[in-house]
Amino acid sequence: MALSITSPYRWGSAVSIIYVAIRVSTANLSPITDCDEVFNYWEPLHYILYGTGMQTWEYAPQYALRTYAYLVPMAATAKFFQVLLDLLPQTLVKQLYAILSLQNTHTSSLSPSSDVYTLLLGSSDKPLLFAILRSFLAFISCYSELSFLSSIYDIISPTLAHWTALCNATAAGNFHASQAYLPSSTVMILWRLSAANQLRGKDTISIFWGLVAVLAVGWPFCAVLFISTGFWALWKAGFSTPFDKHTTSSNEPKGQSWIAQVVRVVIRTIFYTIAIQSTIMAVDFYHYGKIVSPVWNIFAYNAQSGGDELYGVEPLSYYIKNLTLNFNLVAMLAILALPLIMLRILAERPVTLAKETASSHNSDSLKILLLVPMYVWIGIVFPRSHKEERFLFPIYPVLCFGASITIDEIFDAFDGLVRKNMTKIRSKTSKLLTGLVLLSPSAVISISRSFALYTTIL
């Protein structure tokens, strides 16, 4: 999607360049924390690229729980970088080793002039290609972050966008989730793109990204994250008058009946579903040699009693500890976001019924739209006996956004009580600075956690 031309998070701005530089340069400092990433995604990708690699049981034709459609785009990307590496001069490739933090790995004992070092250069150097691919994943994740932040800045609140950016940039969870080659990480990226488009009123594109997440990634459980996306699109099409110029696209049909507009949304969704699913089944047919549906297979497998519990069970405290380690104060604040919004709406209802503006009502509606998936996901994932850290990746963006909303609600409540005489400009400045001060300890703790992961595991 095209980023905002006014937001400081727009593509090409100074902030975006720094943001991308940090994400890409630190991508290979983060350890791989999940064995599934290695054996279910990097290993079969190696097989596609080089013809060798171990096969996990999930890729066996009799089970077919993984879709090759998730691997093919990365394989094409890898081949592109292989060709590019072959064209680069040797000195530039050596610099890539340093930039991508490979100088302390397998080349640490080799001098730049050694024959062995020279043989490692180019497309035959798998560690270098691996590092480039991880940096590429971080780049894509960063693009989705900037899209999300720009939409928040332009449509909801610049202050919320700044606070969300601070949480996103420093969170230890994002440190290892951004470049992870896992379906849950990809769903996180696609949810950001979907949410960013929906905030701008581009519901068709938003639904498309949601369908890609559900059908093409091989993790159909994430469909619950996009239920609110579909309902919002249908509600807008059939029963809502656009609130302002930002929340509806300029090419929306005028004068159509609500039935016609709802049917239009449904038909487009069906068309995208058929197109995406047909492409996926064609790819899987080529690799499996028969017609299969990994989306259905993995859903059926995990729905069985004791399916994923074979791989370990954990108490509820597992996720609580995990969120505390990866987000600390941010996670605690995020959980309070929706209750605080609802409490304020109920408390202000007698007053706002008489003078509520469309823009303020729309702002709350959009906040709730983005927050609901987090609570639905927590309600589904937390009670399950089998727990893994990666299962929480999809709600990482919402945690950061929710924490920002909580601070905003608390500050507004406090401001309404004791700062009624403060000028508007000073109030905005104070709010921004107060939020940064409150989030700074969390940022420091998160950066320390990320540093600990790098120094103790790698």
Image: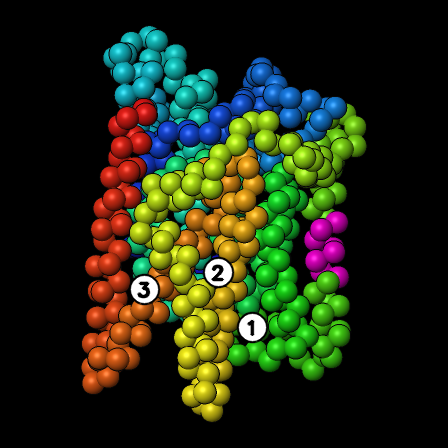
Tell whether 142 sits left or right of 99.
right
Q: What is the crowding at mark 3: few (fewer than 14 residues within 10 Å), some, or many (at least 20)? A: many
Residue that badge 3 annotates? 407
Residue 184 badge: none
Relative image position of residue 162 (x, y in whole percent): 32, 61
Residue 315's place in the image compared with 42, above or below, is below
Amino acid, disc 3: Ile
The residue under label 1 is 248
User: For numbered disc 2, what is the local secondary structure?
Assistant: helix
Toward the viewer: 66 or 446?
446
Question: Magenta segment: does it hold 270?
Answer: yes
Image: magenta residue range? 267-274
Q: Residue at x 41, y 47 (%)?
A: 142
Residue name at image x 31 percent, y 74 percent? 412
> Of circles 2 and 1, which is in front?
2
Residue at the disc numbered 2:
371
Contact between labelled residues 3 and 2, with CB atoms less than 8 Å apart:
no
Q: Find residue 188 and report its horizontal and vertical position in percent.
A: 50, 47
Task: Judge from the rendering whether residue 203 lies leftward or rightward of residue 364; answer left or right.
Answer: right
Name the quadrant of the C terminus: top left
Say what secondary structure mark 3 lies in: helix
- Above-or-below relation of 325 to 195: above
In primary-sequence order, the first of circles 2 and 3 is: 2
Residue 340 vs 168, above or below: the answer is: below
Density class for disc 1 (Cα within 10 Å; few <14, some 14-19, many ≥20) is some
Q: Which marked residue is nearer to the observer: mark 1 or mark 3?
A: 3
